[in-house]
Image (tube, rainbow, N blue to C red):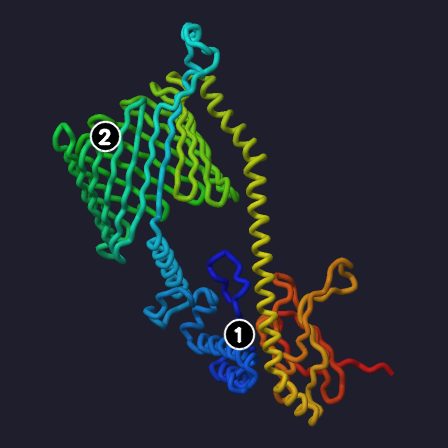
Amino acid sequence: MAASLDDDVEFNNQDYYSLLNVRKEATLEELKASYRRLCMLYHPDKHRDPELKIQAEQLFNQVHQAFEVLSDPHARSIYDLFGKKGLEVEGWEVVERKRTPAEIREEYERLQREREERKLQQRTNPKGTISVGVDATDLFDRYDEDFEETPGGGFPHLEINKMHISQSIEAPLTNSDTAVLSGSLSTHNGNGGGNINMTVRRLTSAKGWGEVEFGAGDILGPLIGLKVFRNVTQRCFLTAQCGLQFSPRGLRPSCSLMTARHLDQNTMGYLQWRWGPTSAMTTSVVRDTKSSHFTLAVQLGVLHSYLMMSYQYKFQDEDQTKVKGSVKTGWFGTVLEYGAERKISRHSVLSATVSVGVPQGVTLKIKLARASQTYLFPVHLTDQVLPSAVFYATVGPLLLYMAVHKFVIIPYTRAQKEEELELQRKSSATDIAKKKQEAESAVLLMQESVRRIIEAEESKMGLIILNAWYGKFVSDTSQKQEKAKVIDVTMPLQCLVKDSKLILTETSKAGLPGFYDPCVGEEKALKLLYQFRGVMHQVISADNEALRIPKQSHRIESES
């Protein structure tokens, strides 16, 4: 059976084939025969004791559910590919039933994406950015006369000269309409302002959407905007946007149009035209592969023209490390940037970038992305390109990261992993306890049936299971500290005997009625001692090995 696409382990995933003791290729007639047999054993009406009746009802429902799934070809195909988790995905009822396994897998992935989207729609999906700008030019651009005039001038002066905070939340109105409320506050050298925006987005079809934006602020004034997105073809899409800003200087209209096309599987081409206060034409090519990301962009504008090229290399490691570099030149000057990015925890990514430009100087940019929140710390070191500033901006964050990684991040992630392992162990122990209770209940329910089977087999010297154990066995050559983890399954196996025969399929025996897994994740086996026609037999079978008894090769030769 193909595992679920999710990486997490499902300890409580009942194997329907094992529960019914049928082959994975079992026909409908084989399923019906096994189902009828188990229904007779677990039917609640056959048990008068109230407690046994409740236990029988639970087991009867499990058997009925297994038969319903495996007897339906469409549901069975889904179960074979994705297990019980695949059947829980909403939307299968409207899917065409005659599909190949590849088509079912593709449909499952689509339904999974839709389910995740619905989950996101049920939340406000908050997103935020906090940016704190630090002026540290005093570290390098100091004048001796200034220090003489300023008390304590021997120490460099660091100043927070700008700050920006933005936040947005989403609120689903209907299945196709979403409202987004966003706001921001900014301050720079003592002067600041803010704005608030309200956007209503409507999904017009599977190929496009449109949104209307209303905004107000204390600097630029009210804003009305309209944006439309449309998939023109499978490889091309178009975005159009227009807006009207009511500023103190009068109306300021703006308009932009962007088209994009897939040039190949990993490459996109973009062409954008903007008209307004910053009119420009921009074209770019973006190539994104598993190991690299490359961007080439050219802009021609009234106030701002530039040529930009960037490259990012992605290491194939657990921490998703990336190193990047870019160069940008235009009417404003030339800027060279280089940096690195690394995942420091499950939901956090830390990056540092050094920007060296003329006439901008040297700036160190530190960024921490935590889930949907982003924290930026641009530190301006000098207005000039000084080798010392470039050196400390490069080496300083690297040494600081190495120290924090060793003394903070590694201990924190190790503690997190230990906590997760402990939760998994508790979950596994809880699941084993539950399965054990179900197995014990099944054994109680089958006692009367087992008694009748033994009487019938004894009367014709048929098949009698004397002892049976299932689990992890320890041989003489194993370590002495290692303990066997086995359970007694004599009665459950005797209950499966029919016409002096016992047939077990190649599925895991842990799902058989009266069985449970005593050692999750470890190799298991089944050991039987049985009697047939008065002769003792013994066999050891692997967990996923088909078994058919009696068999002449299992016979125990008597010592003369």
Report the residue that reaches farthest toward the right: 560
Tell me where residue 245 sits by quadrant.
top left
What kind of element bears circle 1? helix
Q: Earlier in the sequence, mark 2 or mark 1?
A: 1
What kind of element bears circle 2? strand
The mark tally for this picture is: 2
Residue 116 drawn at (x, y percent): 38, 56
User: In the depicted view, which residue is nearer to us: 171 or 534?
Assistant: 171
Residue 237 drawn at (x, y percent): 25, 48
Please name the residue shown 48% across and 11% down the image: 154
In the image, taking residue 478 as reference, residue 415 lies left or right, namely left
User: In the depicted view, which residue is nearer to us: 4 or 56?
Assistant: 56
Please name the residue shown 26% across and 30% down the image: 193
Report the residue that reaches farthest toward the left: 250
Q: Amino acid at mark 1?
A: Tyr
Q: Give me the C-alpha separation between circle 2 and circle 1.
A: 66 Å
Please name the residue shown 32% across and 39% down the image: 285
Return the residue at label 1: 17
The local crowd at label 1, few if under 14, some if 14 to 19, many if 20 or more residues have their Cα within 10 Å, is many
In the image, taking residue 473 as reference, residue 506 lies left or right, namely left
Report the residue that reaches farthest toward the bottom: 459
Q: Are marks 2 and 1 in contact (CB under 8 Å)?
A: no
In the image, taking residue 113 as reference, residue 246 lies left or right, namely left
Q: Amino acid at mark 2?
A: Leu
Q: Which mark is residue 300?
A: 2
User: In the depicted view, which residue is nearer to us: 252 or 433?
Assistant: 433
The answer, for residue 357, to whether it is visible in the render is: yes
User: In the depicted view, which residue is nearer to us: 398 or 487?
Assistant: 487
Q: Is residue 2 above or below residue 18?
A: above
